[in-house]
Amino acid sequence: MRTPVTERYPLAFRLYPYVKSPDQTAVTPIRHKVVVAGGGPVGLATALDLGLRGVPVLVCDDQEGVGLGSRAICFAKRTLEICDRLGAGVSMLAKGVQWNIGKVFHDNRLLYEFNLLPEDGHAFPAFINLQQPLFEKFLHEAIVKAQSQGAPIEIRGSNRIDAVVRHEDHVTIDVMTPDGPYVLEADWLVACDGARSPIRSMLGHGFDGRVFEDNFLIADVKMKANFPTERWFWFEPHFKSGDSALLHKQPDDIWRIDFQLGWNIDRQKELKPENIRARVSAMLGPDVDYELDWCSIYTFQCRRMEKFRNGPVLFAGDSAHQVSPFGARGANSGMQDADNLGWKLALVVQGLAPDTLLDSYDSERVYGADENIANSTRATDFITPKSAISKLFRDAVLQLAETVPFARTVVNSGRLSMPCTYDGSPLNGPDVASFPARTRPGSPCPDAPIGADWLLRLLGGNFTLLAIDADVPTTFSACGIPLSVLSVSGRDNKALGERYLGNATSAVYLIRPDQHVAARFEHFDEEVVAAAVGRAIAKDVVDA
Amino acid sequence: MLETRPNFDRPDESYALLIKAHEGLSEAESHAMNARLILILMNQIGDHAVIAEALALARNVRAAT
């Protein structure tokens, strides 16, 4: 059955209205290099990364823009760094709300407060709060800018993917549009089509994990109240809304309130404005004036696909893995998927790397997903203990936390998203054990100021040879890939020295295009570095 | 490594103090106190490997040699 393309949800921004493509009247299906399914944050970032690398990419989205509703609101430093590389980080930072203080309450008592204490010497803060529609709009603006500079990115709105057939080296895709169906082919399909991924179902892949029997009510309220820009979290709040609640500020005087409601609830009843207002008023107090901006009830699961790569089909973001909301690990981990996949897929499409490089996308991001699922599951079990004894210990921790500092380290209202270090990745090359642990192979490069600029900006998105007070050639190629060469000095640069040198006086780093460390050396040796480049693009299959 | 050889300074006094600390508490209050005590002692040990050994021994004391 061919149902027409319909608007599944109201839009915040109509960014890519439907336009009929010549592909729709082609006699034989047009073959594309890469098709991205879904125009959410992960789909847009993937398309932008590929396009900036000169790889032709087509995004098919069944809507014509960004859906209404704040949804993901906490974006981590690593996400901002990735977006900065893609050309959207500065506008996100300008619009987002920065925060450092968090307060944790039990009932009506303040247990303790924490400060994210952002480390000096980074271009971006630890977190910003920004409504997801704005995050997506900034990515789309960067796409429009990249397109105007020749990046081969096309977005087709109201193009719904109805069927995918997998062949050995390509896929056939049935697309539905307002003008009827057409067929496409693609060498590669990146499924960024969300937690309910239709493509995952079409290809019959499982999505197993743990269901948490709980409902969360999100209420975004607009108010000019005098609450500080802090993250407030309640265990068993005094306003009796349920097991936990969260208050967090977004731009434009919008505040995110999250109420954990429990399992056996009447959704329709809880979503009635008067019932939402009763909860919000109990939380904020009787004298606070506010209006409801957006409300939604959601449940969550912690689960992932067994493999994120299935031949020519790659899964990224929520389609591949889902976590609980505690810790802001959903959208942030999806952005790390896009970051990890973009350069690998580009090298494979360009014929510079074997397609087995994409198996490392699977292994590295499965590792990342497992880390996120473990963290968010632990937070969930602390917030909603699953047995009487678990509750006993949880309450003991909360009781101690008020007066005894050690207990605060065990209180878990969500461990905030940190980028994944790919320890043990087959792409990792040689290490120098005496260099700082935080920049070991597999690590995301920590930023550092370089003169008036920033290290990550200077690294950009190519393979880079980073020389710190070390002799390297001014140009260097390996495996047909020209590397960028960046020579900097760690003298009089405390941040760079601490993060990259430790007690050493010089170092040579091989940095991947996603700004993760591939290998590091005491001195530059052409053969050794070239071998590490080969390893980082999966060319040394012999000992991989 | 978990210490399973005698390590008490004054074993009888320490044990008596433990029992005395529970005096006058309801069963629920005693359980809550034990939970707090376990957390305090876990932090005192600190070393995750030792804590894991202690938990394994407590869980299956008959299997231990």
Image (tube, rainbow, N blue to C red):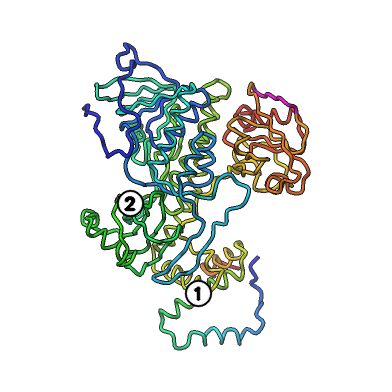
Cα–Cα gap, marks 1 and 2: 32 Å
In the rendered image, the vertical position of residue A319 relative to residue B48, given as above or below: above
Residue A197 is left or right of residue A398, and the answer is left
Q: Are labels 1 and 2 assigned to the same chain?
A: no
Residue depicted at x 42% and y 27%: A189
Name the quarter where the N terminus of chain A is drawn. Answer: top left
As drawn, the label of residue B36 is 1
Q: Position of residue A61 (x, y in %)?
A: 34, 30
- Name the residue tied to disc 2: A299
Residue depicted at x 49% and y 72%: A402
Residue depicted at x 39% and y 62%: A384
For residue B12, what is the image quadrant?
Answer: bottom right
Does the magenta-highlighted stretch encompass residue A477?
A: yes
Q: Which residues are magenta?
A: A473-479
Amino acid of disc 1: Arg
Label 1 or label 2, whichever lies nearer to me, is 2
Q: Residues within 10 Å of mark 2 (few under 14, many from 20)?
A: some
User: Which chain is disc 1 placed on?
Assistant: B
Q: Position of residue A69 (x, y in %)?
A: 33, 45
Amino acid of disc 2: Thr
Residue A63 at least partly seen: yes
For residue A452, what is the image quadrant?
Answer: top right
User: Which chain is disc 2 placed on?
Assistant: A
Element class at badge 1: helix
Q: Position of residue A194 (x, y in %)?
A: 37, 39
